[in-house]
Amino acid sequence: MIRRLRLLLPHDIVIVPLLVFHLVTVGLHLLLFRHFQATEEAAGRVLLAAMVLATMFQGAYRVIAFHPFYNADYREWLGRAPWHWPRPLPAGPIHLVWEDAVILGTFTGVTWYEAGLSAFVLPLVFLGVRAAFLMETFFLTGQRGHGWIIAFGFGWLVWTRSRSPLLIGSTAVLTLVAELGLRASMRAFPWGDCRSLFLRTCEPEAILSKGLGWPYQGLGPLDEPGVLKGREKALVALLAGWSVFTMSSLASLAEDRVLIIQYAWGFSGMAAVLGRLTTYLPGTDGPLSLAGRIRLGRWIIPGYDRLFLGPVAALIICGAGPFAFHRQGASWPVAFSATITLVVFVALTARPSLAAWRLTCDVRTRPRGITREHVRVG
Amino acid sequence: MIIVSGVTHHYGVRPVLLEIDLTIEVGELVVVVGPNGMGKTTLLGVLSGALSPYRGSVSIGGLVRRRSIAEELEIRRKAVYLPDKCWLPGQLTGREFLLGVGRLYDIEHERLMDHAERLLQLFELTENADSPIRGYSSGQQKKIALCSALVTEAPVFLLDEPFSGGLDPAGILALRRVLRHLVKSRRATIVLTSPVPELVEEVADRVLLLREGRVLAFDTPEGLRRSTGCHGSLAQVLERLIYPEMRQHLDDYLRDYAT
């Protein structure tokens, strides 16, 4: 048992500083409590914060340290070994095992005894963080459906946080989805070209072209499919609005909530414009300089200037959307969140697509992705 | 076949190419010559798709450049472009670079390995084949860039000043023979630019002369000789066609200061 527990806990290099940190916080706790007459509640918060952080760390560690996705050497070795699901993973289990309950039970016991925290909080934090790290793997190993359920599920957990039975039930469902996704992911191992996982594509040509310099990087015969497929763009947009709507509910006052949403709304407008331009413009120039446009009277070059239609549309929607939705009877939080969804959707789907822009629009293609590693010839 | 129709291109106000119309047949090696700044590189840029012309169109093998994603990708598979100034991945070895480019152009793996090895031998890069490109001399870097274009086995090559950039005589000789062989045996279509007519006289099927953005002449070397009445080297023919003022200036200079 001790051996298994040692396996599932981080290395001593991590444990020792954490223990020191814990002892310091306990000391601070006692100091606040005894010498500065801090309320027990205030002093307990320090310990609570430390324990929540430790639990989050353990949740992340349980995925990062054991999942072949996060360790290239381990993944490549495992890909060559005669391993297949459901054999035990050589480096240790990623799925939940009873030793996790022992570790979490210890964390929970300490926090409950010293800070009076509900016994459910730390397990929920642990499961949530673990699901978040598993979610990332799902998007890149082919279990995107599981990934999307978890992504939307986080907002739901925040939304139901004050209703314990619902929160616990929802976390259980999310954990089940994460487990099912993990099984499907490991069953699909190996996941193709391992390097491509981190380049968000499975095309070996795409990987090669990223490092081949100019002219192959930019003028090579390489389709550049976007990271997101059509339906997923809508899901990303919905997720943006949903996340803002649910996360803003963490604010205790209604005014604060609207303020938070307004910040997110303003940010979404800027991100739509900047994100679009910074994705499209690198490696391309207009066919004419500004002086050339003015002197030749070609104020608008349709084949180039269409790039700006998407950002302009996103800005118009961003400005007018909340008022239009509110006029239709939506509350301000709903109106702003729905606008954020629309703005993100327009930014992601407006024409031209990235491939169409680079391959068919009136652009001057110039070297892009050139780093210090590249050498200039000629 | 490459068809250039009514191509006009400006960078700023000054037009660099004006109403260029050309047809380059399959299996033809065309050399674009002309004084500096007359639009050779711009023309190749337009042919390669790096530049979108202000007016006009380019079609290669019946496909029109930049008309649709599928067409453009197909053209890019068929036509490889090597600019006079390129950026190579310094951290890759020469061999890795060639294999990477070959994979990009869907060359079958075994054939690619063999072809890369042969090219490395041909351009005397075998000793450096497994060293990072950043350690190559400038001539060797030029050679590996040329090898990368050749390893694609594309039916159309667009090469901007392939003989410049520190290429040694052996490299020049090898490249000239390889290009001539590609045209003859594989019916490859090659368009290249060169500021030095002597280097390309032997290999050119036709010579395209550009001056002030317009086509001054587009004919075989023999045809150019006939039309100018000059039976000397291609350089002498071009001197008459492109540099008449320079000839006059030179005569004046020699008369006034060098006697």
Image (spheres, grey):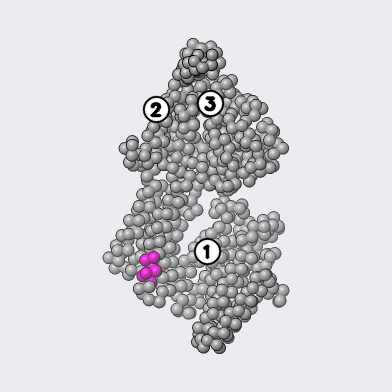
Letter of the chain that mark 3 sits on in the rendering:
B
Q: Position of residue A354 (x, y in %)?
A: 45, 48
The residues tagged by marks 3 and 1 sit, at their Cα atoms, a distance apart of 61 Å
Which three-letter amino acid code belongs to the residue tagged 2?
A: Glu
Q: Position of residue A46 (x, y in %)?
A: 54, 79
SS type, badge 2: strand
B177 to A238, vertically: above or below: above
Decide whether residue B45 is among the magenta residues. Answer: no
Q: Position of residue A369 (x, y in %)?
A: 53, 47
- Asked whether the beta carbons under mark 3 and mark 1 sit within 8 Å of each other, the answer is no
The residues tagged by marks 1 and 2 sit, at their Cα atoms, a distance apart of 57 Å
Name which residue lies at 51% across and 12% down: B230
Start and end of the magenta stretch?
A: A257-263
Letter of the chain that mark 2 sits on in the rendering:
B
The residue singled out by tag 2 in the image is B19
- Around disc 3, counting alpha carbons within 10 Å, would you say few (fewer than 14), some (14 to 19), or many (20 or more)? some
Taking the image as shown, residue B53 lies to the left or right of residue A77, namely left
Tell me the quarter of the picture where residue B156 sits. Answer: top right
The residue singled out by tag 3 in the image is B195
A20 to A150, vertically: above or below: below
Name which residue lies at 64% across and 73% down: A17
Extreme residue toward the left, this view: A327
Closest to the camera, between mark 3 and mark 2, is 3
Taking the image as shown, residue A302 lies to the left or right of residue B139, namely left
Please state which of residues B139 and A182 is positioned toward the viewer in this rendering: B139
Tell me the quarter of the picture where residue B12 sits. Answer: top left
Count of numbered tags: 3
